[in-house]
Image: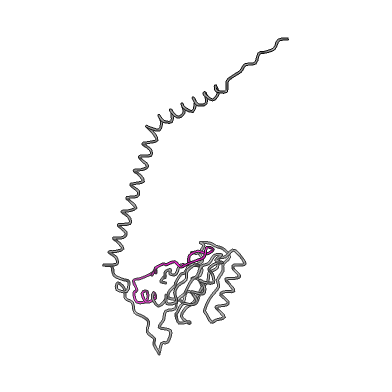
Amino acid sequence: MGTIPAIKIPLTSFTNGGDDITGRIMVIGGQIKAPLVVPLLRMLMYVSLAMSVMLFMEKVYMSLVVAFKKLFGKKAEKRYKWESFKDDIELGNSVYPLVLVQLPMFNEREVYQLSIGAACGLSWPSDRIVIQVLDDSTDPVIKGLVEMECERWANKGINIHYQVRDNRKGYKAGALKEGLKHRYANECEYVVIFDADFQPESDFLWKTIPFLHHNSELGLVQARWKFGKCSSKTSPLVFYFCFLFI
């Protein structure tokens, strides 16, 4: 029986073939790069430059607006009447408007104590301010903590109400609306709203209420926001929010 002779194929045949294919791919890539990729990159560069110019112009414009406002704009105290409240021996604390402070909350474990404490620490005649905590928390543990915090302040003589509801319709806005339906809320002249991570300074009411009280054409006062330091586990604490007139 005859044998089939072995056929030897040099390894360089495959190597040379691979180099040839790679070379062809590089040639084709070079041919595509010149008419297609280069113009595309050039266009992207021009777009980037245009956006940079737009951002620069925006910053210049905003700087000019801020400078003009500071130099020629009137402060709120000059545009609207502002007078501090004066004590009246005969009328007593009734000269001060009754203010409702609303605090909507939803599972606010990290900030509920700070926010409730800041609201309860507002400087205003104690019989002319009502604190309303509107708790939509779904976590029963957090809900219990918020309720206990409200009870703690109530034991200190603060007029604070802890309110819950059986649904979250409208979310926090819905909670605020439901809160206004209570009888004690309807008796209040002004409503101040602080979100759960807000910390108003103690003299907030003294600075803002006079604007609404002495200017009947105003329906809302929104104060400046500023952010405080916070840990990595909590969100920044905002110090001011706004008033609503009712």
Residue 169 located left or right of residue 239: right
- As drawn, the residue found furthest toward the top would be 1
Number of labelled discs? 0
Q: Is residue 81 magenta?
A: no
- As drawn, the residue found furthest toward the bottom would be 89
Residue bounds of the magenta highlight: 208-237
Residue 58: x %, y % from top left: 32, 55
Q: Is residue 235 magenta?
A: yes
- Of the 4 image quadrants, the one containing the N terminus is top right
Seen at 69% across and 12% down, the residue is 3
Seen at 54% across and 72% down, the residue is 113
Relative to 185, residue 12 above or below? above
Relative to 210, residue 222 above or below? above
Q: Nearer the viewer, residue 109 or 39?
A: 39
Residue 139: x %, y % from top left: 60, 64
Residue 203: x %, y % from top left: 42, 77
Q: Nearer the viewer, residue 38 or 188?
A: 38
Q: Nearer the viewer, residue 212 or 141?
A: 141
Residue 227: x %, y % from top left: 44, 66
- As drawn, the residue found furthest toward the left would be 72
- Of the 4 image quadrants, the one containing the C terminus is bottom left
SS assignment for the magenta stretch, majority: loop
